[in-house]
Amino acid sequence: MSRAWISELLALAALLLGAVLAALLFGHLAWMLLLALVLFLARWSVQLVRLDRWLRSRRRDPPASWGIWGHLFDDYYRLRRRHNESKKRLAAVIREFREATAAMPDGTLVLDREFRILWCNNAAVELIRLTNRSDFGQPVSNLVRSPRFVAYLESGDYDTAVEIRSPIDQSRRLMLRLVPYGNEQYLLMIRDVTRLHRLQAMRRDFVANASHELRSPLTVLGGYLDSMADDRDLDPAWRRPVRQMQAQCQRMNNLVNDLLELSRLETEETDAPMDDPVDMPALIRRLGRDTVLADADAHPLEIAIESEHGLLGVENELYSALSNLVNNAFRYSPEGRPVRVTWRDEADGGACFTVVDQGVGIDRRHLPFITQRFYRVDSSHSRASGGTGLGLAIVKHVLKRHGARLDVESEPGEGSLFRCHFPAERVCSTRGREQDRL
C-alpha cells in the first residue's frame, strides 16, 4: 500500500477516534460517527470540485493538497505533462513529414480503404490537378480516370506499378504504384516518367531504324552467298567458309527480325483493344506442323490439347510467343529428346500453355534474368544453335500485352518447364478438344 493511502487511512482513523472521544464526553456515539464520516466525505467532495476546476482550466500547476488527493494531483500532472510533450513530438514529426513530402518531386496521396483521398503533397496537386479541398474525400478514380489505372485498383495486385497517360496532359506519362499500410489505408505514389519514356522511345526508334537499314545489305550479302554456294565451279577450299558466312548472315537476319518484332511490341499502343478471338487449339496444331517441318525428325513433338477454349488477343503475337518457347525447347534439347506442349484450362477460369523439354536445363540463379534482351545462360551454345537472345524477351512482352504471366521451373541437366498463364477474362470458347502426337 502506498504512503498516500496510509496517510489517508490514518486521517480517517483520527477523525473516527475524535468522534469516539466526543461521544464519551457528550454521548450520542452514532451521531458523532456519522458527523465524522460526513466531514470526511465533505473533504473528498471539495477535492473533487478542485480537480474538476483544474482539469477545465488552463492552469499548469496542480492545486496544493495532501494525502491521497495530493498524490492523485501530482500523478495526473505528470501524466498530462508527458502527454503534452508527446503531442509536441508528434506534431514536430508530422510537420517534418509534411515538409519532406512537400519537397519530394514525386506525388504522394494517402487513401482510405475505399480509395478516397485523405491527404496529398504539393507534387500530387500538380500531377493530377487537385483543384480545391472539395477533392479531398473523393475516390481517386474520379480524378485519374484511365481504364488501366481503374483496373489496377480493382485487381488487388499492387506488387508492380502501372503506367498511364497524364489526366491533364496526354503527352506526359505517369507511373503509379499503390502501397498498402496501416489499418486498411493506402499510399499512392505518382512519378512523372515522361523523360524516361521519351528516352526509351528514342532507343526503340534507333534500334528499329538501324535494323531496317541492316536488312538491305544483309539481303544483298545473303543473295551473293547463296549464288556462291550453288556454284558448282566454286573452289572446294571456299565451300566451308561460304557455308559459315551463310550461317552468320542468316543469324544476323534472325536478329534483325527479332529486333524489329520486339520494337513493334514495345511501341504498340498498350491501350489499344486486343479482343479478336483466337482459336488456340488450331493455332497450336499449326505451330506443331510448322515446327516439325522446320526441325525435321530431330526432336519428337508431343501436343496435348485438353481445352476447347481460345483467347481474346492478337493471333500473330500469340503465335510468335508460343513458337519462340517451342523453338527454344528444341534448341537446348539433345537430338532425339521429346518436347511436350499442353493447352489446358485452369481452376480459376484461365488457361495455361505449357512447354516441357528434357534439355540442358537452367541454373536457378539465371531464372530471374532470362527474359531480358540478349541475356544468355550459355553464350557459346546459344550462338552455335542460332539463337538471338531475344526470344524470351518477345515472349515476355506478348504475355504482358495479353495480361498473362510466365512461370519457369528448371534444373541443370533435368530440362525446363515453361508455363504461360492467361487470365480468365482473356479466355473465350472455341470448338474441338483432342490430343495429338506428332
Image: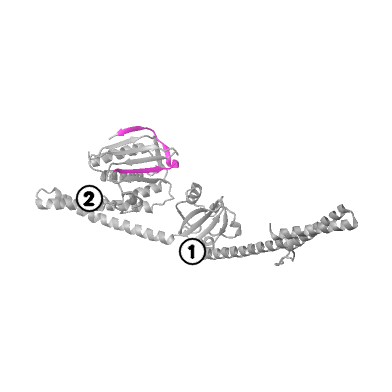
Quadrant placement of the C terminus: top left
Q: CA distance from mark 1 to mark 2?
A: 48 Å
Report helix, strand or loop for mark 2: helix
The residue that label 2 is drawn on is 384
79 on left or right of 228: right
Report helix, strand or loop for mark 1: loop
Q: Earlier in the sequence, mark 1 or mark 2?
A: 1
* Residue 186, above or below 293: below
Range of magenta residues? 414-436
Q: Amino acid at mark 1?
A: Pro
Quadrant placement of the N terminus: bottom right
* Residue 99, above or below 17: below
432 on left or right of 165: left
The residue nearer to you, when weighing 359 against 399, is: 359
The residue nearer to you, when weighing 35 against 28, is: 28
Crowdedness near tag 2: few (<14), some (14–19) or many (≥20) residues, C-alpha within 10 Å: few
Q: Give the percent coordinates (x, y) of residue 192.
A: 46, 60
Q: Give the percent coordinates (x, y) of residue 11.
A: 77, 60
The residue that label 1 is drawn on is 105
Provide the major secondary structure of the magenta segment. Answer: strand
Q: Give the percent coordinates (x, y) of residue 349.
A: 44, 38
Residue at horizontal 27 percent and vertical 38 percent from the top: 338
Q: Give the percent coordinates (x, y) of residue 263.
A: 34, 53
Crowdedness near tag 1: few (<14), some (14–19) or many (≥20) residues, C-alpha within 10 Å: some
The residue nearer to you, when weighing 314 against 162, is: 162
Can I make out residue 409 in this image?
yes
179 on left or right of 357: right
Residue at horizontal 61 percent and vertical 57 percent from the top: 134
Q: Amino acid at mark 2?
A: Ala
Q: Are marks 1 and 2 in contact (CB under 8 Å)?
A: no
Among the 4 quarters of the image, the one containing residue 335: top left
382 magenta-colored: no
